[in-house]
Image: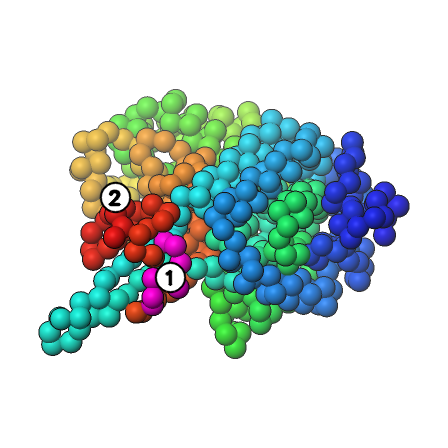
Amino acid sequence: MFRSWESNVKMQYFACRRERMELHGKNLIGGELSAEGQRSIVARNPATGKDLFPGFFEATSSEVDRAVRLAADAALPFSQCSPEKLAAFLIEIADQIQRLGDELLARASSESGLGLDRLTGERARTLNQIRLFAEIVRSGSWLQPFIDRALPDRKPLPRPDLRRTCIPIGPVVVFGASNFPLAFSVAGGDTVSALAAGNPVIVKGHPAHPGTSEMVATAIRKAVEASSLPDGVFSLVQGASPRVSIDLVTHPDLRAVGFTGSERAGRALFDAAARRANPIPVYAEMGSVNPVFLLPSAVADAERIARGVFGSFTLGVGQFCTKPGLVIGESGAAFEGLRGRLAELVRDAPAGTMLYGGIRDAFRQRVGEAAEVDGVTEVMAAVPAVVETSDKAEARAHLLSVDAGTWLENQELHEEIFGPATVAVGCDSRAQMTAVANALEGNLTATVHGTPEELEEYADMIAILRGKVGRIIFNGYPTGVEVSYAMHHGGPYPATTDAKYTSVGATAIYRFVRPVCYQDFPDASLPDELKNANPRGLWRVVDGRLTQEGW
């Protein structure tokens, strides 16, 4: 036990109010701290190249097993929480995170290199999405109740009474993302949507920001304690090795996985889950090039479009999953002018700090591979060469230019470059632009700039894009994902492993539920959303008609 703990109760650490939180580096297994493994995870400040302390203990297989078994034990009682209790728990999580104050932002900044203004906005987004899911829980909209009342006189066979609702899927593991240490991490959208459905959650903290992960996890543990919920409702395990991830995904008591990260890591988790004796779903958001198609009127507006594209692909040092990695237009004097203006903006760009050294190294490698393709021209920011050898995780902006024929023939140019780079593709005709659209793999987004009349003219290309992406943007930019009911943040593989689901917004909850149908149950034994009188006042589909009426 740490000497800063109070000694009167089991959860004294989480009840302790201190002006400054002291990181301990241990795994949070339910309500207990555990350190069976090695203190081998050390975060590094990407802006300075210096290590951050303390070190963090990598979870052992035994600790992973305990965390998942605790979650399995908690699954039934947690699933039976009333909507009021569950919503109050989510609000308590938001309140506890808020109470961490600027200390949380300072630690997140030191571990990620992200500025305090960016992190302040990300914290607000995190808290807002938690509160959104509390509203969803109270509304009961996620239950999607359907009722087909019995038809005993139907010929040739009577119809039984059938009533369908949604229930929690069971213990979920969430993998924290590197590029959003708050909004897509320990208390991010995956975790909160899973909890909102009544599922226990085990989070594997990202090894690049273990201190941030511990701070947020401690806030959630306080909320579990304050809400008198079972210990297994939430756990945090730390890990840098693939073994921890595979231990989690292959545990027989686990029921689903939420992941945001690289295609390589996401596919490894997906394959491991598929090989299980009882395969489980892996909802992985992975690579996306997010093409931007410039129709003739947009190509002619070179200054505005160049500034917009540049601002979008360098935002956050290009470390957004919705960063535009392709800019496509018909070749000619106007497109060359736009490409030239974009090159000027790139040359004048300052270096930016990436999230950690590994991402910087992967970025440099991918840019180098793409630039080596015959026919590719490279423009980069004019930054002193010392940046390339520094311990700091700094990177320069890059613009790669290529004709559509070369792009179509070289698969390596189709793949995501995670970081501040984009590829400008010149097409010799509208037909070739459509061919580029047809050659795209699955993406999160596609953007089209032009006029409403041009949209009609290019309707065949728009129809192709609709089959390639989860969100189509007109005269905007893909960076910036609204947390709302209508948002769909997903797309065909390799953007995600299941294009039917979003990882952002209200409907993210449907990844972590499954339908169940009650046949001929007495009214008293049905859940409230299916009872005749409709005591919760929900909108339901009764005999094919949407209604709030009971009977």
Q: Could you tell whether 237 is left or right of 91 in the image?
A: right
Q: Position of residue 258 (x, y in %)?
A: 52, 55
**Mark 1 or mark 2, which has the lower sequence index?**
2
Residue 388 or residue 469, whichever sits in front: 469
Which mark identifies residue 462?
Answer: 2
Q: Is residue 542 visible?
A: yes
Question: SS class of the residue under badge 2?
Answer: helix
Question: SS class of the residue under badge 1?
Answer: helix
Identify which residue is drawn at 41% across, 62% down: 514
Q: Magenta stretch containing residue 150, yes or no?
A: no
Say which amino acid is labelled 2: Ile
Q: Quadrant of residue 202?
A: bottom right
Identify which residue is drawn at 52% across, 77% down: 277
Vertical order, 451 against 1 (above or below): above
Q: Please tell me how crowded label 1 is: few (under 14), some (14-19), or many (20+) other residues with Cα within 10 Å.
A: few
- Which color scheme does this rendered protein use? rainbow
Q: Position of residue 25 (x, y in %)?
A: 78, 49
Say which amino acid is labelled 1: Ala
**Dot in front, 1 or 2:** 1
Q: Is residue 190 visible?
A: no
Structural distance between the alpha carbons of marks 1 and 2: 51 Å
Residue behind mark 1: 524
Residue 279 or residue 513, whichever sits in front: 513
Looking at the rendering, the stretch of residues picked out in magenta corresponds to 521-529
Q: Position of residue 270 (x, y in %)?
A: 51, 64
